[in-house]
Image (spheres, helix red, strand yellow):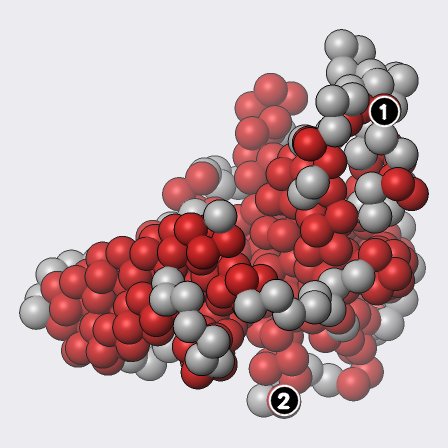
Amino acid sequence: MKTFTAGRYGYAAALWALGYGLLGSAWALGMPGFPWGAADPDPDGALSILAATTPRFGWWIAAFSLLVAVTALALTRGSNHRAPVFAAWPIAALLVLVIPDSRLMMGVAYTPLLLVAPVFGWDLGGATFADAWPWPVLNQLVCVLGGLLMAAAALAHTRGQGRRSWFTPERGRVAVYVASAVPLVYCATRWAWALGIPLGVSEEFLAEGADGLWLAGAYLATFGAFGGVLTLGLTQRWGEIFPRWIPALRGRRVPPLLAVVPAGFVSIIITVAGLTYIRWTIAGRFAMAEWGAWLPECFWPVWGAALATATISYHRRRRHDTASPYPHKAHPARTS
């Protein structure tokens, strides 16, 4: 079964690489839709590391995709060679954490707002889903998918070797506390600005958002704080058994993927956004006097890494609880 799992993810990653390599070749040959460079709506090219590329870069995409395909197919073999795994992780990191930028997080954060705004008659200045999810940002999701397939194939290959996992329940609990605490610094600054308190910024900076910008920031902060509370469920009973106050579901087992999929995706987008801010900080785009506008975001990679660790530990702890004839009566202490 483990070999089959490794093969399944490996073949899926190879198919993704084949498709994306063909797409890169088509862009290089003149097909429209190249997602970077002049076609990217990023106004000053500060978000994407590939902002300066042209469609001719598609040939490099094709060559990289060939490397991805070869590595993915190597992972489907049941050998003990570690070379494919060592190659797979840098590839996965590049696709998941380096190529995307902070617009992934903004798209996810503003999607609920775009959904409820028409219901309450809120004016969002004409913003639409096309503004939150233009093709260059959707392309980032495609790259993340390829990276996740490669990471899954590498994990399955390693598990097939019988090696001990680093993601233990104890590390998972520590990671949950870290992932719940780190976003509170960001939340404090944005809530303070919405209340007119210049925490970490000057009075002049605060005045620039008097037209409602800081209310949007407070919305994002509340979104992050709510996510921090949900993170606690990765080590709490209500993260495995629906609590009593949820009608129709009370007492039933929480499907593991209901927590793993959103938490895993959020860990990616906040890490990517944090890396963008770190890159901007290194480039000297920020002033120390306005630390509240950028320093909390620089800790987001810590938040993302902790959330990813907590999520993987939760998944490993719960992946066998469906074998119980009464999974809804299982206690977290007995499923670890």
Residue 102 or residue 173, whichever sits in front = 173
Q: What residue lies at 60% left-to-right and 29% top-to-bottom?
A: 117
Above or below 155: residue 250: above
What's the residue at 73%, 84% (across, down)?
287
Task: Tell which residue pokes out farthest to the left in this image.
Answer: 29
On the question of residue 331 being in view, the answer is yes
Q: Amino acid at mark 1?
A: Lys
Q: Position of residue 282 (x, y in %)?
A: 63, 89
Number of numbered labels in the structure image? 2
- Measure the alpha-carbon separation of dots 1 and 2: 51 Å
Query: Where is mark 2, residue-wise?
Result: 282
Rendered image quadrant of residue 16: bottom left
Q: Earlier in the sequence, mark 1 or mark 2?
A: 2
How dense is the environment of label 1, judged by Cα within 10 Å: few (below 14), some, or many (20 and up)?
Answer: few
Nearest to the observer: residue 4 or residue 309: 4
Residue flagged by tag 2: what amino acid is it?
Ile
Viewed as shown, does residue 184 lie left or right of 285?
A: right
Q: Where residue 173 sits in the image (x, y, percent)?
A: 87, 57
Which mark is drawn over residue 329? 1
**Residue 251, horizontal then vertical, whole percent:** 84, 18
Say which element carries label 2. Answer: helix
Q: Which mark is residue 145?
A: none
**Other residues around mark 2 within 10 Å, as few (<14) / some (14–19) / many (≥20):** few
Viewer-proximal residue, 165 or 21? 165
Image position, residue 196 (x, y; %) = 88, 55
Residue drawn at 33 percent across, 81 percent down: 52
**Circle 1 SS class:** helix
Q: Are marks 1 and 2 in contact (CB under 8 Å)?
A: no
Kindly indicate the quadrant of the structure image that contains residue 99. Answer: bottom left
Q: Is residue 153 above or below residue 127?
A: below
